[in-house]
């Protein structure tokens, strides 16, 4: 059973086809429907009001008599004056087969800015209403192309680029067939022809779209060989896409957690430097940056993040710290303590020189006088 919302209340062929480009957003666990009836309503009236004609008797018996041979029939809200104002049924009663059911919510952008959504309820082991095909970004179009079409365009572009001296002519032909503009300027054809940059950016920034695009490119590869994927193969591709999406989403989550750990840990490390000495700061950093420490064997990258934060106050979300002269030297010395040997060589093999450079780089943007000659000239003399 599918309950579809259409913004213009217009029938669409894609609805009767199972809305194949729709994307599943949510789904429920299995639940039981044992009465043999389902009520569909849009919260305009309470369940008690919809069932009031049963008069306190058995609602299932009342619905059975009301439906007769029909599978579904409209219901009144039984709220005084409401049905006349609605101009459409306030709800529906539908015969269903008793047993375990599951609900899934889908969305589809059938046309630009006109989204359809629907709730699909399926009995366990029933044939699916929603065709089992790889996702297509909810039917979204960018640059006049769906994700499925862009995957085919990309596959054809890659094939064209392999044609050596004929690559440019082949790319121009791909652009013509897909009604895509041809960029101008030297080298622009090979670099940007047959690409939709907005699709590329959307795919790169979304684990779900990335997985769907990989699936659609797999299908495109089969079709370019003259092979139309079978339903069984499509199911395998969709399953792999789901797995890929989970992996990408997990990787993105891990990256966000690592970035949060560095950002928050750096702020805490800077404040800790007001009271702790360099060796103590190294131990504190191991606690604050467990991921970086486990990955590199040292918390040095956490110190790098903290010092970079001090160098760029009020940039990229960095806070501006007060009294940076209390913490900068100790952070630089602690950083040197836990640096790997190759990093020390990169810094000139001199702790004194490294500390002086960090002090100059931090003090200047924070409005603190640099010890010595001062500012730019102090760093220049050190380098000389």
Image: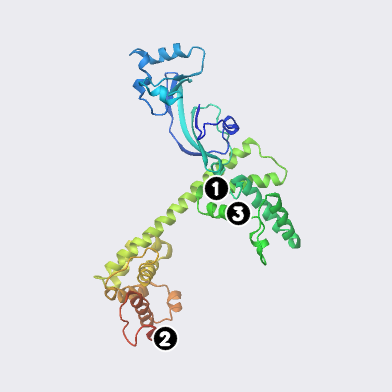
User: From the viewer's perspective, is residue 255 above or below residue 336?
Assistant: above
User: From the viewer's perspective, is residue 358 above or below residue 195?
Assistant: below
Q: In which quarter of the image is residue 158?
A: bottom right
Q: Which of 296 and 335 is in front in this view?
A: 335
Residue underneath mark 1: 211
Disc marking residue 63: none
Q: Nearer the viewer, residue 43 or 269?
A: 43
User: From the viewer's perspective, is residue 257 above or below residue 88?
Assistant: below
Q: In which quarter of the image is residue 52?
A: top left
Q: In which quarter of the image is residue 219?
A: top right
Residue 364 place in picture, x, y as percent: 35, 78
Name the front one of labels 1 and 2: 2
Q: Which of 54 and 156 is in front in this view?
A: 54
Of labels 3 and 2, earlier in sequence is 3
Residue underneath mark 3: 196
Residue underneath mark 2: 380
Of labels 1 and 3, earlier in sequence is 3
Q: What element carries label 1?
A: helix
Residue 273 place in picture, x, y as percent: 28, 70
Name the front one of labels 3 and 2: 3
Q: Which of 150 and 348 is in front in this view?
A: 150
Residue 51 place in picture, x, y as percent: 37, 18
Residue 146 place in picture, x, y as percent: 60, 45
Left/right placement of residue 42 relative to residue 20 reads left
Q: Is mark 3 on a helix, strand or loop?
A: loop
């Amino acid at each position: 059973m599918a309950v579809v919302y259409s913004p213009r209340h217009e029938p669409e062929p894609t609805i009767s086809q199972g809305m194949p480009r729709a994307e599943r957003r949510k789904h429920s666990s299995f639940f039981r429907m044992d009465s043999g009836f389902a009520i569909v309503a849009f919260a305009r009236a309470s369940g008690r009001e919809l069932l009031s004609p049963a008069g306190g008797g058995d609602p299932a018996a009342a619905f059975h008599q009301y439906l007769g041979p029909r599978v579904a029939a409209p219901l009144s809200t039984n709220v005084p004056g409401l049905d006349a104002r609605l101009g459409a049924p306030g709800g529906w009663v539908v015969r269903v087969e008793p047993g375990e059911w599951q609900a899934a919510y889908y969305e589809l952008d059938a046309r630009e800015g006109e989204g359809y959504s629907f709730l699909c309820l399926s009995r366990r082991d029933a044939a699916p209403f929603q065709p089992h095909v790889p996702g297509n970004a909810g039917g979204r179009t960018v640059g006049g192309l769906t994700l499925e079409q862009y995957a085919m365009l990309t596959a054809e572009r890659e094939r064209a680029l392999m044609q050596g001296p004929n690559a440019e002519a082949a790319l121009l032909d791909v652009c013509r067939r897909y009604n895509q503009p041809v960029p101008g300027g030297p080298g622009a054809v090979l670099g940007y022809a047959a690409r939709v940059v907005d699709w590329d950016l959307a795919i790169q920034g979304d684990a779900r779209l990335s997985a769907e695009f990989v699936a659609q490119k797999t299908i495109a590869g089969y079709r370019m060989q003259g092979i139309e994927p079978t339903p069984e193969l499509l199911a395998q591709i969709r399953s792999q896409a789901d797995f890929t999406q989970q992996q990408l989403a997990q990787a993105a989550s891990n990256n966000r957690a690592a970035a949060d750990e560095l950002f928050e840990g750096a702020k805490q490390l800077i404040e800790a430097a007001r009271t702790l000495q360099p060796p103590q700061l190294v131990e504190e950093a191991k606690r604050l940056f467990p991921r970086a420490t486990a990955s590199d064997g040292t918390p040095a990258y956490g110190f790098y993040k903290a010092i970079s934060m001090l160098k760029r106050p009020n940039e990229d979300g960095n806070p501006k710290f007060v009294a940076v002269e209390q913490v900068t030297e100790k952070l630089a010395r602690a950083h040197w303590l836990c640096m790997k040997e190759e990093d020390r060589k990169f810094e000139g093999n001199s702790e004194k020189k490294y500390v002086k450079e960090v002090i100059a780089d931090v003090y200047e943007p924070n409005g603190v006088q640099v010890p010595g000659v001062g500012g730019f000239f102090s760093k220049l003399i050190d380098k000389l």
